[in-house]
Structure formats: structure tokens, C-alpha cells
Image (cartoon, helix red, strand yellow):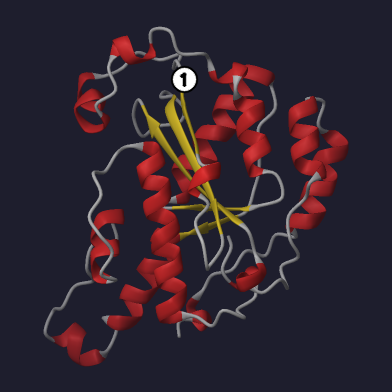
């Protein structure tokens, strides 16, 4: 069990959503905040999650933009593939050759794609009332916040469970003994694919937003099964 290592969020997310609902001028954001989030006392076995992944033009949310979004709802027992969504959007920044090599999305793929402003309401509908699950929270949080700020002059805040963060905590614990430090044993990679391999999950081709969202959902299910009680409170694992 690694519950005692979690740097849980001290933010009162229900209160934050209530304030944001009152302050927001955008109708789609207002509806999203109105749906609120579960109580932090909710057992994770009773929680509906939404795994989310972005592919972007680069890693700097101040200069790069979102290209694709993949989402899939799930619980600890089931992944709802029939409710999965995938969007390709036209970024406001140029595609760099190095990013094309990574995610395989080319200029022709985005030529007729809509701007995010045309579909962000659909994304918010998917998110409403659920807890986001991501692998490295800075991408989804910072890019979505910046993209909405640039388009509607309002950002977005939401709690997440970060599977990379959970895996980092476990690796620190697993490799933290004096003997292991003495022999120079280093923590293993916490990248999505490497993390999945340790739990016996299958290899998926990376850098496709929907595939990575499904991969993240499966990873959280495995992490909970191995390291947590299903009755663990939501507030102990979200950030």
C-alpha cells in the first residue's frame, strides 16, 4: 500500500467548482462546473472516471497547441469503449516536423479539422461529473486551460488522478530501501508503456490520443488492484 505517500490535493474541488460556476460567463463551462465533482470521501470503487489524452504540437502550452483529444469513461470494473470519443482539431500553431514524427499527424490530417472552439463543448460534456485520469497531468491541465483562455478568455480547472504520479510514488517506495540505494538501484521508467509492462498489460502503439486514453484507464485499474484498497477515498488519490 502506498496511500501514505500520496500528496493528495488540499483544494476543495466541490467549492472550487461552485465558485467557478458562479463566475463563468461561458455557457459550456458553466454547465461543466454545474455538474460538479464527486465528494472527496467517495470510495474509488464508486467513482466514474474519464481517461483523457492529448496529442500536441509540442510540450510548451504557451507556444504549442492541441491536435487530438481522446477520452474514454470507465470504472474500476469496466471501460466503456462504446462511449469513447476522439477529436482531431486544427492547431493555431504550425506543426513541427519532430512532432509529426512522434504522433504521425500531418498537415493534411488537420487541413479540414475544426478549431477547438467548435468542439470544446463536446469535450466538456464528456468530462462533466467525472474524475479525469491522465498520465502526466501537466499536459492535459495546462494545454486545455491555455487553449480555452486563448479562445474564450476563460481557463479551466479540474482535479485529476495522475497515473504517472502514482507510479512515481510506488517506484520511490519500491527502490527506497537503504540497501537498494547503497547498490545504486534506480527507479524504473514511469512512461506509460513501461508502467503498463510492469503490470502485464499489453503493448499498444503509443501517441494516439484515444489509444493512450484507453491505456491510461487500464493502467489505473491495475495500479489500484496492486497497491490500493477499492475503498480508498477519492480525496486520497486525486491532485
Look at 56% across and 69% down and name the residue there. 237
Total labels drawn: 1
Q: Quadrant of residue 235?
A: bottom right
Look at 55% across and 20% down and name the residue there. 116
Residue 191 percent coordinates (x, y): 28, 55
In front: 19, or 222? 222
Q: Quadrant of residue 226?
A: bottom left
Q: Residue furthest left?
A: 183
Residue 70 percent coordinates (x, y): 46, 38
Look at 35% across and 25% down and name the residue there. 57
In front: 57, or 215? 215
Q: Is residue 215 left or right of residue 50?
A: left
Q: Is residue 171 left or right of residue 39?
A: left
Q: Residue furthest bottom?
A: 179
Residue 231 percent coordinates (x, y): 62, 81
Q: Looking at the image, is 78 positioned above or below residue 35? A: below
Q: Circle 1 — which element?
A: loop
Position of the C terminus by quadrant:
bottom right
Look at 41% across and 71% down and name the residue there. 223
Q: Looking at the image, is 15 positioned above or below residue 41? A: above
In front: 81, or 98? 81
Crowd around label 1: few <14 · some 14–19 · many ≥20 (10 Å): many
Residue 85 percent coordinates (x, y): 51, 36
- Residue named by callout 1: 89
Q: Residue furthest right?
A: 22
In front: 57, or 177? 57
Q: Looking at the image, is 200 positioned above or below residue 158? A: below
Position of the N terminus by quadrant:
bottom left
Amino acid at each position: 500500500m502506498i496511500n501514505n505517500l500520496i500528496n493528495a490535493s488540499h483544494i476543495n474541488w466541490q467549492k472550487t467548482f461552485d465558485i467557478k460556476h458562479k463566475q463563468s460567463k461561458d455557457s459550456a463551462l458553466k454547465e461543466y462546473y454545474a455538474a460538479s465533482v464527486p465528494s472527496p470521501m467517495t470510495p474509488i470503487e464508486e467513482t466514474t472516471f474519464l481517461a483523457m489524452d492529448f496529442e500536441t504540437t509540442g510540450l510548451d502550452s504557451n507556444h504549442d497547441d492541441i491536435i487530438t483529444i481522446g477520452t474514454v469513461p470507465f470504472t474500476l470494473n469496466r471501460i466503456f469503449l462504446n462511449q469513447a470519443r476522439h477529436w482531431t482539431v486544427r492547431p493555431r500553431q504550425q506543426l513541427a516536423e519532430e512532432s509529426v514524427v512522434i504522433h504521425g499527424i500531418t498537415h493534411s490530417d488537420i487541413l479540414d479539422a475544426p478549431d477547438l472552439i467548435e468542439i470544446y463543448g463536446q469535450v466538456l460534456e464528456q468530462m462533466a461529473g467525472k474524475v479525469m485520469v491522465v498520465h502526466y497531468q501537466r499536459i492535459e491541465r495546462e494545454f486545455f486551460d491555455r487553449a480555452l483562455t486563448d479562445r474564450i478568455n476563460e481557463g479551466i480547472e479540474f482535479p485529476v488522478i495522475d497515473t504517472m504520479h502514482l507510479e512515481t510514488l510506488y517506484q520511490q517506495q519500491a527502490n527506497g530501501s537503504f540497501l537498494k540505494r547503497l547498490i545504486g538501484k534506480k527507479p524504473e521508467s514511469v512512461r506509460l508503456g513501461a508502467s503498463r509492462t510492469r503490470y502485464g498489460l499489453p503493448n499498444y502503439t503509443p501517441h494516439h490520443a484515444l489509444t493512450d486514453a484507453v491505456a491510461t484507464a487500464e493502467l489505473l485499474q491495475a495500479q489500484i488492484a496492486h497497491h490500493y484498497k477499492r475503498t480508498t477515498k477519492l480525496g486520497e488519490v486525486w491532485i
